[in-house]
Amino acid sequence: MAYWFIFCKTDILLIKQDEQNYTIPLSEECPIKIHPWTHIMSTSRMEDGTEVRTLRIDNPSEGLQIADNCNIKKEQLEQCPLRQSYYKLPANLYDKAGKCQELIYWDANTQFCGVCGSPMKMHTEISKRCTNCGKEVWPQLATAVITLIHKGDEVLLVRGKNYRSKFYGLVAGFVETGETLEQAVHREVMEETGINITNLRYFGSQPWPYPSGIMIGYHADYVSGDIHIQKEELTQGGWFTRENLPTIPEPLSIARMLIDDWLGKDTAQGVSLKDQNKEY
């Protein structure tokens, strides 16, 4: 038996068990009819040893078709955006769905060799080799840092230009070559807000499969400087107390976990991040 993580564009296929519970299709063979040339990928097993397979299908104009000898009913199938599946799936299945999405994204963007242009072929479950020159590639992660800055009873929250809704988040940015995570935090904070910080405290890390990143979270303390928002990245920013918080990020993000940690709340993922920190 294997879990089948099936994606159609950015949606993942779920099985609706009842009004409140969802899962991922579990069967010997692919639960839906697919083309013979569909690329099925395997990845690391679930903690209980169950195999994991993933694939991408084109948007079916005639609708999904249940495979022969599959006991899943068509009315149980539901396509759901990966972000929204966080609120429907158990945490371990959501996490694995994110990894599968990252593998599919990597597969679609490494069809040809970056050196000689020849076709790439799967070599292991997580690597490809050029059919001509032998160059090997593995899935790449974009590393980013994200920081909750404290100033007495206040924290710094900002609004990014690319935010889809009117929530405030945290200062964040990608790590550049040749710098440490801590150097990246100081640089991003200075570039985006113009303030100086100190006393960085590692909070935790989170895979961010949108499309393929990892977020490293920190708490930090304000030292000096007035806020000067970087207009290319942000639209607003300011200091907020617990009593006057604006709309904050969704529970699935490490930004929200950092804020909840400051508020003294435990989100399900936030607890696991703090437990993870204790282990190392």
Image (cartoon, grey):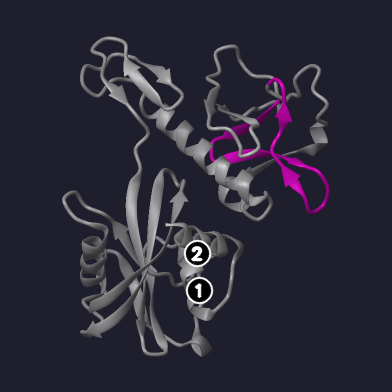
Q: Residue furthest left?
A: 178
- Dot 1: within a 10 Å radius of its alpha carbon, few (fewer than 14), some, or many (20 or more) residues? some
Name, please, the residue furthest toward the front. Answer: 279
Contact between marks 1 and 2 (CB within 8 A): the answer is: yes
Q: Seen in the image, is 24 located left or right of residue 234?
A: right
SS under mark 1: helix
**Percent x, y for residue 106?**
41, 32
Q: Which residue is mark 2?
A: 274
Q: Is residue 278 magenta?
A: no
Name the spot of residue 116 as percent of width and height, x first: 21, 16
Task: Look at label 2 and name its amino acid.
Answer: Lys
Q: Quadrant of the N terminus?
A: top right
Q: Which residue is mark 1?
A: 261
Does the segment drawn in magenta span residue 2? yes
> Residue 111: in sight, yes or no?
no
Rendered residue at 76%/24% (across/down): 66
Q: How many marks?
A: 2
Q: Please state the horizontal and vertical placement of residue 234, each as a whole percent of the image.
A: 32, 69
| Amino acid type of the residue that numbered disc 1 sits on in the rendered structure | Asp
Q: Name the residue rendered at 83%, 26% in the picture.
A: 71
Q: How far apart are the two marked residues, 1 and 2, measured between alpha carbons? A: 9 Å
Give the magenta part as a residue range: 1-29
Measuring from the top left, give residue 168's x and y in whole percent: 44, 72
**Residue shown at 56%/46% (left/top)?**
95
Residue 275 shows up from this direction = yes
